[in-house]
Structure formats: structure tokens, C-alpha cells
Image: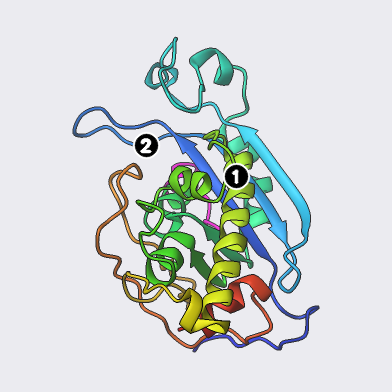
């Protein structure tokens, strides 16, 4: 059975935007290792940031991290060698994610899968979202490819928000700002369709809901660098319209 929520601000679930920086497998059989976790918690109506958390994470095998990193995030072996292990920070990550709406860019096929893997590694139950908002799906469906492509760096540049730093906490805050800007454009286009309307291209549905049996709605993806051309998301019973924030509500009402 799907869970339903009141439009009351105090009863609606908070939204947590989160992002991971990971190693990238170089050959078959290698896996992803989480190197950094970053998250902000926002209120469901005003999208006001009420909590943030970020940490570097030391992988079990340090050799998977280059001594001199050519990574866009600049994370080197030296940067993580004295960082806590995932097991050390698992309680904090669980508390910030569990029972909230998860939001982020391409999280459904990448980040939430890596979270599940990391908790499996330490034989701990993974946190479970009450719903997922994947901005890759939202923007593909509603905003189209008018910015050029659906990479966060491209979208941020399109709106003049600066360069993507590829660090978890910076990226989640940029993700929220991109959503706000896109929502404003779409709202204006819907209000003044004859003057501003631009047909958006995209794929089906974006928001999904976790079932009460706790099964994760996440889907596997082998690389986050190239978002899938076709997004197989399906919308179930929508959230109460007051519960996801005014900005995200705009995307829903423009369906």
C-alpha cells in the first residue's frame, strides 16, 4: 500500500538532496567505492535548508584512488587515507537519509544503488526513502535539452550559476538552484504560453514512491558519467501537492 501524506507542513516528509563522489571502475569486475557523501535537508514547502552534512570516506582498498588524481573532484589518495571508513559514518548517513524524500541528479540509477551497496558491505540495513525525486528525469521530461544536454555542469552554466565543482555538498546545492531556475522558466512559459512557450522533450515520469515493504525503487547503472538515453521511471500515486515544495510542485502541475 502506498503511504499518503497530509499537506500539513509539519506532517510532510522533509526532502534530502544528496550526492556521492566515487571511484570509477577502469575494467570489468571492478566496483565503485564511495569517496565522499554530501547532503542537505530542506523543508518540504519553502525548501529552506535546515541541515547539512558532508564527509570524505576512506575505501577499504586505498589503491583504487590515484596518488595524483586526474579526477574532476580533485580527491586524491592522500585526501582520503585518514578519512573515516563508511562503517564509521554509516549511522550519520542512515539518520540523514532514512524516512525522507530523496532528491538529486541521476540518483535513482546511481547514487541510491551505491548507498545500498555500501550498507550491504557492512552488513547493515540500508536507509529507505519515502519517495525519490530524480532531477535528471524531472528536467528531461519538463525542460528538455534546451541547455544542450542534461549534465548538471551544462545546466548550471546555462543559468549562469558557475562551474560545477564535483564535490558532494557543492553539487547538491547547485542541484537545488538549477531546479529553482528551471521551475521559474517553466512557470513563466505556462503563464504566458503564446510568448514564452518552448516545447520540452523528454522521457516518461519522474517521481516514484517506495512501497511499504521497504524495497528500494533504485535501478542499477554501470556509470554515472553518461545518463541513460531512455529513463524507465514510472509514477505511482502522486504526493500530496503541498508536500514537495513550491518549486517541485511547479514541475508536477505542468504535467
Residue 161: percent from left, percent from top: 60, 45
Residue 103 position (above or below residue 206): above
Residue ID for mark 2: 32
Coloring scheme used: rainbow
Q: Residue at x 49, y 15 (%)?
A: 77
Looking at this view, is 238 or 59 the one in front?
Answer: 238
Who's the residue at 75% across and 67% down the image?
43
- Estimate the spatial distance between the alpha carbons at disc 1 and disc 2, rounded to whole Å: 29 Å
Q: Quadrant of the C terminus?
A: bottom left
Indicate the position of residue 200 as horizontal and vertical percent values.
Answer: 37, 71
Dot 2 alpha-carbon crowd within 10 angstroms: few under 14, some 14 to 19, many 20 or more: some
Q: Nearer the viewer, residue 166 or 62?
A: 166
Q: Which secondary structure lies at badge 2? A: loop
Mark 1 vs mark 2: in front: 1
Residue 126 counted in the magenta span: yes
Check residue 128 for magenta coloring. Answer: no
Q: Which residue is mark 1?
A: 161
Side of 28 relative to 180 (left or right): left
Against 85, residue 255 (above or below) is: below
**Which residue reaches farthest left?**
28
- Give percent across and percent down for residue 244: 64, 75
Task: Report whether residue 19 is seen.
Answer: yes
Q: Residue at x 41, y 81 (%)?
A: 235
Name the foreground residue: 55 vs 156: 156
For marks 1 and 2, the one nearer the N-term is 2
* Residue 21 in picture, x, y percent from top left: 49, 36
Pointer 1 local density, CA inside 10 Å: few below 14, some 14–19, many at least 20: some
Label disc, if present, on residue 46 of the rendered structure: none
Q: Which residues are magenta?
A: 117-127
Say which residue appears at 62% left-offset and 18% top-offset.
82
Q: Indicate whether 22 appears above or below 15.
A: above
Amino acid at each position: 500500500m502506498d503511504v499518503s501524506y497530509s499537506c500539513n507542513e509539519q506532517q510532510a516528509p522533509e526532502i534530502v538532496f544528496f550526492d556521492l563522489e566515487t571511484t570509477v571502475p577502469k575494467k570489468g569486475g571492478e566496483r565503485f567505492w564511495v569517496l565522499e557523501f554530501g547532503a542537505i535537508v530542506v523543508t518540504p514547502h519553502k525548501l529552506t535548508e535546515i541541515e547539512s552534512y558532508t564527509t570524505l570516506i576512506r575505501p577499504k582498498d586505498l589503491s583504487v584512488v590515484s596518488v595524483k588524481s586526474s579526477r574532476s573532484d580533485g580527491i586524491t589518495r592522500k585526501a582520503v587515507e585518514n578519512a573515516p571508513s563508511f562503517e564509521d559514518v554509516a549511522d550519520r548517513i542512515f539518520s540523514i537519509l532514512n524516512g525522507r524524500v530523496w532528491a538529486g541528479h541521476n540518483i535513482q540509477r546511481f547514487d541510491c544503488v551505491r548507498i545500498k551497496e555500501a550498507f550491504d558491505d557492512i552488513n547493515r540495513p540500508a536507509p529507505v526513502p519515502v519517495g525519490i525525486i530524480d532531477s535528471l528525469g524531472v528536467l528531461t521530461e519538463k525542460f528538455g535539452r534546451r541547455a544542450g544536454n542534461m549534465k548538471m555542469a551544462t545546466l548550471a552554466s546555462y543559468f549562469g550559476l558557475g562551474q560545477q565543482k564535483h564535490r558532494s555538498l557543492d553539487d547538491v546545492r547547485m542541484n537545488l538552484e538549477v531546479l529553482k531556475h528551471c521551475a521559474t522558466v517553466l512557470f513563466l512559459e505556462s503563464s504566458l504560453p503564446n510568448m514564452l512557450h518552448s516545447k520540452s522533450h523528454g522521457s516518461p515520469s519522474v517521481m516514484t514512491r517506495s512501497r511499504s515493504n521497504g524495497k528500494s525503487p533504485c535501478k542499477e547503472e554501470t556509470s554515472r558519467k553518461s545518463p541513460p538515453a531512455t529513463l524507465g521511471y514510472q509514477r505511482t500515486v502522486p504526493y500530496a501537492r503541498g508536500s514537495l515544495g513550491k518549486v517541485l510542485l511547479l514541475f508536477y502541475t505542468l504535467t
